[in-house]
Amino acid sequence: MLQVDQFESIPFLDGIQGNILKSHGRHHTANLFIIGDDGKQDLVKAWIHSLVVGTNPIIRSGSEQIHNNLRWKAEKVDSGVFACLHISAAGYKYLFGDQKVEDFEDEAFKLGMAHAPLNDPPADFWEEGLQQPHFMLLLAHASDDKVRALVVEIQKSIMFFTKIASVEKGHAIFNNMGAGIEHFGYVDGISQPLFFDDEWERYRADNEITSDDDIKFDPRANHDLVLVPDPFFQDENAKGSYFVFRKLEQNVKGFKQAEEALAFQIGLEGEDEERAGAMLVGRFEGGTPVQESPTDSMVNQSVFNNFDFTRGDASKCPFHSHIRKTNPRSDLPAGEAAKRRMARRGIPFGHRNDDPDDGMIDNKPEGGVGLLFMSYQASIVNQFQFIQQSWANNPTFPNFNDADPDGLDLIIGQGGPKYPVTWGEPNFRPATFGQFVHMKGGEYFFSPSMRFLREIQEI
Ligand code: HEM
């Protein structure tokens, strides 16, 4: 584990961008999808350089982020804007030509999300602004007004050499208990790999762990779960991380109706009715894992994570529930699920006029809201893409019973049948039916080292 109070003596923290090992934690973000103009590479490089050096650098290193977090905790000093930059394979090609992209090891990154084997809708159906971006600049602040002002400022400063294809805005939303939720109303962001000792201490306290015998699920992780060498340098302190962005629209009304219909079909009534939704997600709305309790009643429910599944038994938490599909814990031999974990950094998008926590269905949005899913990992092939393709989209995982498959992940599973588009010709398109999360576009990126950002003009 990395020791927070020793952060100044961990040299690689200076060399990575913030947000990878710890979330930036701001409640408002704007994700700018940017495409560089042909022939303007020098101007683009100068702009990227200015984000880390000069009069007003906005990109923070991992160690600056920790320094600022500690100041916030001790003195309540707000460090203001946070930014980090991500570059796609198309972006590296634009800046340096095709050859340099070959230095990256991750094949999924090199191909891009549009060519990923994920059963997604074809890329030409994605939102236009999310197709083939070169860069994604994430801006974050406690105040939405500040984020807006910053977007305008950036737009003005780069308009002569780039096109901003899309601005995706994210806003944290909360339930009545003050816990961060996603749009279906479930507490999110509970289960994360933990890299720092202060996070582990908090986990021990939240989960009432007093000795090693109490540990049922161990979230501790080494930083190499998400960090790899930046291929541009032979420098052990210049590290980066592969980054996934996926815009997932949520039909909240449809989902809530389906939850109700499911409860009716299987005969759950009264306080048991809530368990229908819990069996889709694996947790109740408040966070209580359905593996641990038949009702949403656990103390510390919005932080509780110290549980495992009973191997081979789906009588409490079904195999197809979202958290069992995406982190099967003890369903797999020790270490097998742990090596797939990602640092999830998603944030909800879209505004709603209803109270997500009011228990009503008719007033819920059918579109325009969702999750900007984001994650950091050392390998897209082995982490995000593996989880989505081989687990979430695989009807026989994790029970491996081909004769009686448990089905896709009902939250994010992509894998409807393919339909012929041209009658009589082998021109098929996948389409999904009865699904309440819709993929609107996305990309694979690399979050380069601070050294790359500083020295980009000399490369
Ligand atoms: C709109 C889309 C999504 C929704 C509504 C959603 C919702 C949730 C919720 C409510 C949780 C439980 C809270 C927690 O344990 O942190 C969760 C956990 C998780 N989700 Fe998602 N999620 C979505 C997309 C995705 C995607 C695309 C992936 C990756 C392929 C993913 C991977 C995970 C993982 C790994 C966990 C933690 C499981 C664990 O360790 O127990 N999610 N999600």
Image: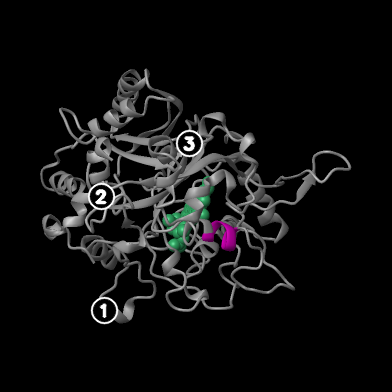
Residue 112: x and y, percent? 52, 46
Q: Nearer the viewer, mark 2 or mark 1?
A: 2
Residue 417: x and y, percent? 75, 51
Q: Which residue is mark 1?
A: 211
Instruction: Give the residue type at disc 3.
Output: Asp
**Quick one: label 2, few (<14), some, or many (20+) residues within 10 Å?**
many
Instruction: Give the residue type at disc 2.
Output: Ile
Q: Which residue is mark 3?
A: 355
Secondary structure of the residue carrying tag 3 is loop
Res. 304 in view: yes
Q: Earlier in the sequence, mark 2 or mark 1?
A: 2
Q: Earlier in the sequence, mark 1 or mark 3?
A: 1
Front-most of 118 and 427?
427
Position of 403 compared to 2: left or right? Answer: right
Q: What type of secondary structure mainly makes up the magenta span?
A: helix
Distance from the alpha carbon under mark 2 to that under mark 1: 34 Å
Instruction: Identify the residue shown where x is 21% and y is 61%.
Output: 198
Q: Mark 3 and mark 2 in contact? Answer it, CB < 8 Å.
A: no
Residue numbers of the magenta segment: 386-392
Position of 441 compared to 263: left or right? Answer: left
Q: Which residue is mark 2?
A: 16
